[in-house]
Amino acid sequence: MSAASSLSVIPVPGPGAEDVVVGTHGRDEGAVFTGTADGSIFRIGHDARRIDRVAHTGGRPLGIEIDPDGRLLVCDAHRGILRIDPATGGVEPVLHRVQGRPMVFCNNAAIASSGDVWFSDSSTRFGIEQWKDDFVQDTRTGRLLRLGPDGEVEVVLDGLAFANGVALSRDEAFVAVAETAARTVVRLWLAGERAGQRDYLVPDLPGYPDNIARGSDGLIWVTIASPRDPLLERIQHGPPWLRRQVTRIPERLQPKPKRTVRVQAYDDQGWLVHDCDVRDAGYHMVTGVREHEGRVWMGSLEEPAVAVLNL
């Protein structure tokens, strides 16, 4: 599906509007929230004409979810998991340390009906400012974790290749986590005959996924931040010394994400339902996605804007 003509780009007053979520409570119902590189959380009004800064995390907000009380649950790359009241701007720290050590790269989350928060820590070696180092060196130190309503936290999967987006199936029988560096979406079964088993929802994506999210249509939407790069993958499979050297060469000579706007949607069996590949959009590097009532909202780690596509 090529859809350049129906993509709208909405500027926000800050760079790197990385993720998006659509409000579901009261006055925020239908509004869109995003977080930018300067630590701001913005609320985009229903008609996209009014944009307000509702909070400041003091860090770098990435994944954003909405909890049952209408508060924002934010994965901040520097400060860990936060809860934010969009009405007052109050910021409540929830979790920063795991097993006695600060998280290095808290990234994305999904909230279960039980109150469990499933979230990713992309790397135990490199923070967001050095995300390319982890990606190229393929450290496979990413983790999927669960934070219970009682405050207990556990690592449920480790050894992931840049753990990123997180989503639950419609019936919460499994939790899915994107492996950016491996171009996969891993699935961990939580219920049924396969409970405790790990497999793949999508074993071979056409590019590198970032955030993922379950839409109002029940599908799991996956961002493709950049198409597959065979040269980069040869480097990833090379000896460790080569991978380290590549990240030490000047920035202009390092592999770069190719310009693209692409999101896909999969059902809970892993079948591809939508493939939205937008050409010549004046926007690039989609890292956040949220389908809501037939509209697909997108965020970008690079752009000072969000975008919306009408299906």
Image (cartoon, rainbow, N blue to C red):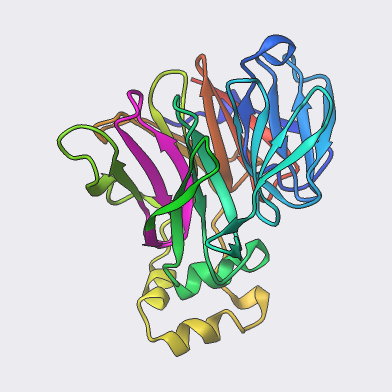
Q: Nearer the viewer, residue 259 or 124?
A: 124
The reply to whether the magenta stretch includes residue 181 is yes
**Residue 217 horizontal/vertical position (percent):** 42, 18
The answer to whether 111 is drawn above or below residue 122 in the figure is: above
Q: In the picture, which quadrant includes the N terminus?
A: top left
Magenta segment boundaries in residue numbering: 158-184
The answer to whether 149 is drawn above or below residue 205 in the figure is: above
- Residue lying furthest left in this view? 193
- Residue drawn at (29%, 51%), measured in percent from left and top? 204
- Residue drawn at (46%, 24%), measured in percent from left and top? 215
**Residue 76 horizontal/vertical position (percent):** 67, 49
Indicate left or right for 20 with 242 as reference: right
**Residue 148 horizontal/vertical position (percent):** 49, 39
The answer to whether 199 is drawn above or below residue 100 in the figure is: above
* Number of callouts: 0
Residue 109 visible (yes or no)? yes
Q: Nearer the viewer, residue 161 or 10?
A: 161
- Residue drawn at (49%, 36%), measured in percent from left and top? 110
Which image quadrant for residue 309?
A: top right
**Residue 136 horizontal/vertical position (percent):** 49, 72
Indicate left or right for 122 with 96 as reference: left
Indicate left or right for 43 with 4 as reference: right
Q: Nearer the viewer, residue 229 or 300?
A: 300
Residue 209 visible (yes or no)? no
- Residue lying furthest bottom in this view? 241
Which image quadrant for residue 274?
A: top left
The reply to whether the magenta stretch includes residue 293 is no
